[in-house]
Image (cartoon, grey):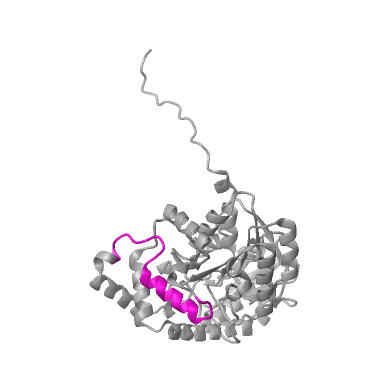
Amino acid sequence: MTVTDSAPIAAPVPPLAARARAIGGSPVRDILAVIARPEVINFAGGLPAPELFDQEGIAAAFRDVLDEAPARALQYSTTEGEPALRTALADRTSARGLPTDADDVLVTTGSQQALSLLATALLEPGDTVLVESPCYLAALQAFGFAGARIVAVPGDADGLDPAALEELVVRERPKLLYTVPTFQNPTGRTLSAERRAAVASVAARRGLWVVEDDPYGELRFEGERVPWIASHEAARDRVVLLGSFSKVMAPGLRLGWLRAPDALRRACAVAKQAADLHTPTVNQLAAARYLADRDLDAHVVRVAGVYRERRDAMLAGLGEALPDGSDWTRPEGGMFVWARLPESYDTTALLPRVVRHDVAYVPGAPFYAGEPDRFTLRLCFVTQTPEEIGEGLRRLGEGLGAAPR
């Protein structure tokens, strides 16, 4: 046998897991990558306004933690989260009408991680998950990646229909319902107190986990706060409440949490050990210090006041920007307006034309678990000033006006 210099023919590597091949990326992230030009007025992202971050307060919290307890701040921590932060989160939750102890809380690396942990702890491939229609896009990704069968619950302008929910629970035998009941992403709508009570009743009577995601609830501009589904006694042993600092403090901290019944919370902690061991210690301690030294509630009031002005600017200009026959939501808080154009307008097909006018939105189709409504779109109103919103809507009107009917 002779030895040659020729390289051996390499065998192919094993394929990716089926779930990785089946689940695509985020259309929102893909759009943001395409429109990453400074001249584009971006209504597509769900990005908080960076000029409203309390940079001084957050920086002071990090300095104090690193000056006073550097060894602790830079060391490994417990999977469940830093006790000071868990206590502060429990106190804030209790003050809002849901009695909570620190041991009820698991700190996560953003509330998006909480969805992944819950999917790991609750779902087997093929299990059914019920979602709103339309639904938060990254939740569809998380549950799809777990191999779940995702079924949309019918609803109307006021959110999901509890009667339709019960019919689906009986017929489909799902593991869980996922909902963003307050200032929902993408529609901005809020589920009424009566419907929340009905959802809790269905969960109690039919045996169902409810994942109640509340990243926007503190950003209320008007109206009265609606109690969490988790606060209803009938469903307290089966509702998981998710929260986040991303919209009220800063998304770069990547701090979220879940409040869950003991057995499920422990299962999520085990899943988190396998995922990242724990959320960054220094970020947790800085957030706890911020909550101790600063008035987060007052900061949120200031942010919400600015966001209200921006919402009003968007609502004031939509009538001229969108084609005749369009309609849209009027959110009482949060970050998003949801619009539906006449049925001759496919918002996915139209987006490249609109982007040529240096403005962008998110088409509605990716937010649907079932048959998409291709005439819908989502607009984020918090990132730009009222003047920029006005100019962006002018460009949007030009782009849609130039589109073929």
Residue 227 visible in image: yes
Q: Which residue is drawn at 37% across and 67% down?
A: 82
Q: Residue at x 65, y 75 (%)?
A: 196
* Frontmost residue, 272 versus 326: 272
**Highlighted range, magenta:** 73-99
Q: Residue 272: x percent and y percent?
A: 45, 57
Quadrant where the C terminus is found in the figure: bottom right
The percent coordinates of residue 328 (x first, y second) are 68, 77
Residue 199, compared with residue 207, is above or below; it is below
Q: Is residue 90 magenta?
A: yes
x, y (%) of residue 79? 40, 60
Whether residue 33 is visible, yes or no, is no
Horizontally, is 139 left or right of 287 in the view? Answer: right
The residue at 34%/61% (across/down) is 77
x, y (%) of residue 259? 50, 68
Q: Does the magenta stretch include residue 171?
A: no
